[in-house]
Amino acid sequence: MKTSSLVAIATLSLVAFAIPSSYAQLDNESITINTSKNAYGPGDTVNLSGIVNEGAPGQLVAIQVKDAKGNLILIRTVQSDQNGNFNLQFKVPLSASPGNLNITASTRINGFVITQSKSTTTPVPEFPASGLVLAASIASLLIFYGMVSSRGMSGMKQRVGGGK
């Protein structure tokens, strides 16, 4: 009985001493993501960079980007260099919903999945109907020009015809 108690105490001691070192190791294992700006509009190019700390050279990093409504904009896997750095460029689609652009990067280090998220802003356009207003203005000008031109031409025909 004494031997089994001694083994149990020794096992618990080893586990107790091993747990803090495991947590300390997890603190060093991380992934960081950055963008060159805090806000991106539809059609803008996002320059995403990051670093995998304590990962192996050539570490694979999964990148997922969603717009404010949760629509998937991008899903890509990139590979880090020998120092753990990675980069990715992508365009924000014109159809992206205004609000937060949610970027998530994940990788597996020493059997643990490490994930980091970042939000940037996709601003609401100042004039959301500007394209429609511009098209209506151009159409109105063309109709007006057509009406003025046809009146001017018929008046010219009458003058030319009346002079003969």
Image (spheres, helix red, strand yellow):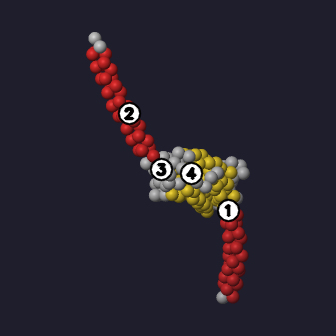
Residue 127: which numbered mark, if any?
3
Percent position (x, y) of residue 62? 57, 53
State which mark lies toward you, 4 or 1.
4
Instruction: Tally the marks.
Output: 4
Specify few, some or many for label 3: CA neighbours under 10 Å numbering under 14, 14-19, or 20 or more: few
Kindly identify the residue that appears in the image at 69 percent across and 88 percent down: 2
Specify few, some or many for label 4: CA neighbours under 10 Å numbering under 14, 14-19, or 20 or more: many
- First in sequence: mark 3 vs mark 1: 1
Asked which secondary structure carries label 3, the reply is: loop
Q: Amino acid at mark 4?
A: Tyr
Q: Amino acid at mark 2?
A: Leu
Looking at the image, residue 21 lies above or below residue 110: below
Residue 29: which numbered mark, if any?
1
Looking at the image, residue 86 lies above or below residue 140: below
Q: How far apart are the alpha carbons under marks 2 and 1? A: 64 Å
Residue that numbered label 4 is attached to: 40
Q: How far apart are the alpha carbons under marks 3 and 1? A: 45 Å
Asked whether, in this view, residue 49 is left or right of residue 164, the answer is right
From where the camera sits, is residue 57 visible? no
Asked which secondary structure carries label 4, the reply is: loop
